[in-house]
Image: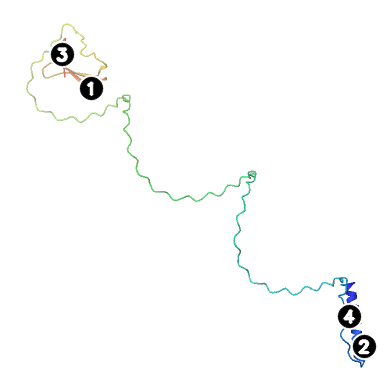
Amino acid sequence: MKRLVVTTLVTLSLLLFAACERSVGLDGPQGLQGEKGVQGPVGDTGPQSEQGIQGIQGEKGDTGATGDTGPQSKQGIQGEKGDTGTTGDTGSQGEQGEQGPAGSKGTKGQKGTTGATGSTGATGSTGATGSTGATGSTGAAISRAIPATNTITSLDTTGDVGSYSSVTIGTDGLGLISYYDNNNLDLKVLHCENTFCAPYFRRR
């Protein structure tokens, strides 16, 4: 409304000015400025113009300062365990390592028990007959008188003795008896002190 009033006043002023130019009379004094008219109503919004061409992109600004680290959030609930993946291929075998130092020698073990006596081996073949030796000196006289009665005398009864016994007559005409002692694993020899080999005898 105010805009309309102002427009009307301006139009009237122009008309009066044009009429005054046509007259020949003297210009009168300038009139007082009229009061400001009431502002007219706001006109309708004009149509939107087309979008202008986009301007050239400006230079990249400096990187701003890093902001403060935000507060740490609470740990979430652990998810369910996933399925086991397939087994991967076996890797290649590594190179053999260096040989370690030799260990210290261990302590000697206890002596084992003696094994059972083995069976007697087969008799070997008879060797070749040796040459006849030189005739020895004449020995002492040997009494081969047959005793009137035979007497059995035990000469050694200690332990397991008497195996593999052998009897002969020595150069002195007295008996010599050899036998094996199984307890002491030893070969023993008895030398009789008389032709009856009893009751006294001497051990070697």
Picture coordinates of residue 118 (x, y %)? 31, 25
Q: Amino acid at mark 4?
A: Val
Instruction: Classify residue 134 by image quadrant.
Output: top left
Q: Nearer the viewer, residue 112 or 141?
A: 112
From the viewer's perspective, is 89 left or right of 190?
right
Helix or strand or loop: what does disc 3 sit on? strand
Helix or strand or loop: what does disc 1 sit on? strand
Marked residue nearer the N-terminal end (2 or 1): 2
Residue beneath disc 3: 201
Instruction: Classify residue 10 by image quadrant.
Output: bottom right
Task: Assess disc 2: are there few (<14), some (14-19) or many (≥20) residues with their C-alpha within 10 Å of its C-alpha.
Answer: few
How far is mark 3 from mark 1, CA to CA? 19 Å
Mark on residue 10? 4
| Labels 2 and 4 touching (C-beta < 8 A) | no
| Labels 1 and 4 touching (C-beta < 8 A) | no
Helix or strand or loop: what does disc 2 sit on? helix
Image depth: mark 3 or mark 4 in front: 4
Marked residue nearer the N-terminal end (1 or 4): 4
Q: Amino acid at mark 2?
A: Ala
| Labels 2 and 1 touching (C-beta < 8 A) | no
Q: Amino acid at mark 1?
A: Asp
Q: Amino acid at mark 3?
A: Phe
